[in-house]
Image: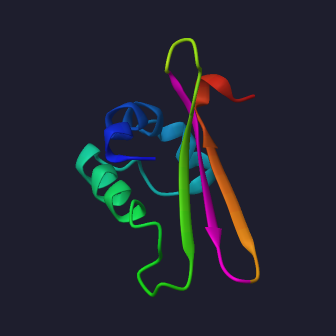
Amino acid sequence: MVLADADDLFRVLDDARLHDFTGGTPLTRDELKARIAKWQSRASPDQTQLWLNWVVRIAATGTIIRYVQASVTDQCATIAYVTRTAYSG
């Protein structure tokens, strides 16, 4: 994921229904851009985790339908994803 994905990803994540499961409220566009900028370092602030982030798009249209995150240490990986509401079910 790169900063250029922010506007498209914002349209996916600016959905209060997603937060029924995750808690909190949708980030503002500027907050999302700041978060993506941090993720682009690909490392946690303490350098103990590798942070990998991807958007998943429909090839024919370029529409983002999901984003995927992996946090990797020397002993394990934790994977999480969020699916656009219109494409879940």
**On the rendered image, what quadrant is the C terminus found in?**
top right
Q: Is residue 9 left or right of residue 51?
A: left
Quadrant of residue 79 within the rendered picture: bottom right
In the orientation shown, which residue stands out farthest toward the left? 30
Q: Which residue is painted at 60% across and 23% down in the image?
A: 86
Q: x, y (%) of residue 50? A: 56, 72
The structure residue drawn at horizontal position 45% and vertical position 87%, both measured from the top left corner, is 46
8 on left or right of 61 = left
Q: Position of residue 16 (x, y in %)?
A: 47, 40
On whether residue 67 falls in the magenta region, the answer is: yes
Provide residue 22's location: percent of width, then percent of height.
58, 55
Estimate the x, y position of residue 15 in percent, counting from the top left. 46, 36
- The secondary structure making up most of the magenta span is strand
Q: Residue furthest top?
A: 60
Closest to the observer, 18 or 1: 1
**Which residue shows up at 41% across the image and 81% down it?**
45
Looking at the image, what colour scheme do you see?
rainbow
Q: Which residues are magenta?
A: 63-74
Using the image, determine if residue 66 lies above or below residue 61: below
In the displayed structure, 46 sits above or below 33; it is below
Q: State yes or no: residue 26 in magenta.
A: no
**In this rendering, would 79 be left or right of 55?**
right
Relative to the observer, which residue lies in front, 12 or 26? Answer: 12
* Quarter of the image where one finds residue 82: top right
Residue 25 vertical position relative to residue 48 in the rendered view, above or below:
above
Numbered-mark total? 0
Of residues 59 and 67, the one drawn nearer to the viewer in this rendering: 59
